Image (spheres, helix red, strand yellow):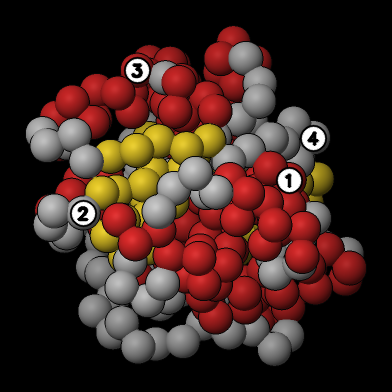
Amino acid sequence: MKIGIFDSGIGGLSVLHEAYHRLPGQEYIFYADTEHVPYGTKTPEEIVGFAIDNAQFLIDKGADALVVACNTATSVAIKELRRRFDIPILGMEPAVKPAVEGTEEKRIMVIATPVTIREDKLRDLLHRVDEEHRVDLKPMPKLVEFAEKEMFDTPEVIEYIRSSFADYDASKYSALVLGCTHFNYFKPAFRDFFGSDTLLVDGNFGTVHHLADVLSLDMNSDQDTEVYFDDYHKMLGQSKTEYYFSKKFIEDEKTLEHLKRLHNRLEEVRKL
């Protein structure tokens, strides 16, 4: 069983990293469409075209199932992908439902790309689960650019987050929903702004859990297992993973070291 995972860039690594925890032993193909990142500022037509190309590439490489590890691509392209390709294809959506069900009274902030916030898919989700109209929406497109540059805790990032939330009272929020897989890298900065009592909610666990159900795979229940990499050869060997950046197979030491740092960052912030 080969599982293909794609995103516009490195955000989708957070889904792969969760899969390492929950579905160890599977074979993975990770694809980052780095030539076209970010998707959140592209037109829907462009995003659909990119998604089809990504999916076809992964299927040609032997993927038996696909995870669209990108909220933006899911919101505009998932129906077309399922129409074109006859394999299981799973998407992402902002984890609004667990945020609503896991908190009471206070408000919930959903941050995502402009496309995700604009599309009907999120509006339909809010209509179903946000009965008390507690959710606020905030586009934060520059975080994708920061993540791609491996800028997570820099003064520029901190200032961007603070200025983006300048008109909001952090004490009024019980949950922050990370509606873009790139946003997981910034959990420490979000935690500093919103405080320790605010839940940080992403869709990675839910997506991997759904993947396990669809493929009838057993989930690893050991939540305390750590997935750190001190050597990129171990990273490549973890569940037999292949990495591609815009159709280029990743095997050079510089990029592999970059991927290793990203995985270790995701492990550091995973439980925040």
Chain-order first, disc 4 or disc 1: 4
> Sequence-wise, which precedes: disc 2 or disc 3?
2
Q: Earlier in the sequence, mark 1 or mark 2?
A: 2
- Residue 125 screen position, x and y as percent: 24, 30
Q: Residues at badges 4 and 3 in contact (C-beta under 8 Å)? A: no
The residue sitting at the top extreme is: 45
Residue underneath mark 2 = 106
| Picture quarter with the N terminus | bottom left
- Residue at left offset 24%, top offset 23%: 124
Q: Amino acid at mark 3?
A: Asp
Q: Circle 4 sits on which residue?
A: 35
The mark lying in front, picked from 2 and 3, is 2
Q: Reading the chain from its start, which is encountered first: label 2 or label 4?
A: 4
Kindly report the distance in space between the C-alpha atoms of the residues bearing marks 2 and 4. 40 Å
Residue where numbered disc 1 is placed: 145
Label 4 vs label 3, nearer the camera = 3
The percent position of residue 155, horizontal first and vertical second, equals 77, 65
How many angstroms separate mark 2 from mark 3 (CA)? Answer: 25 Å
As rendered, which of 184 and 50 lies closer to the eye? 184
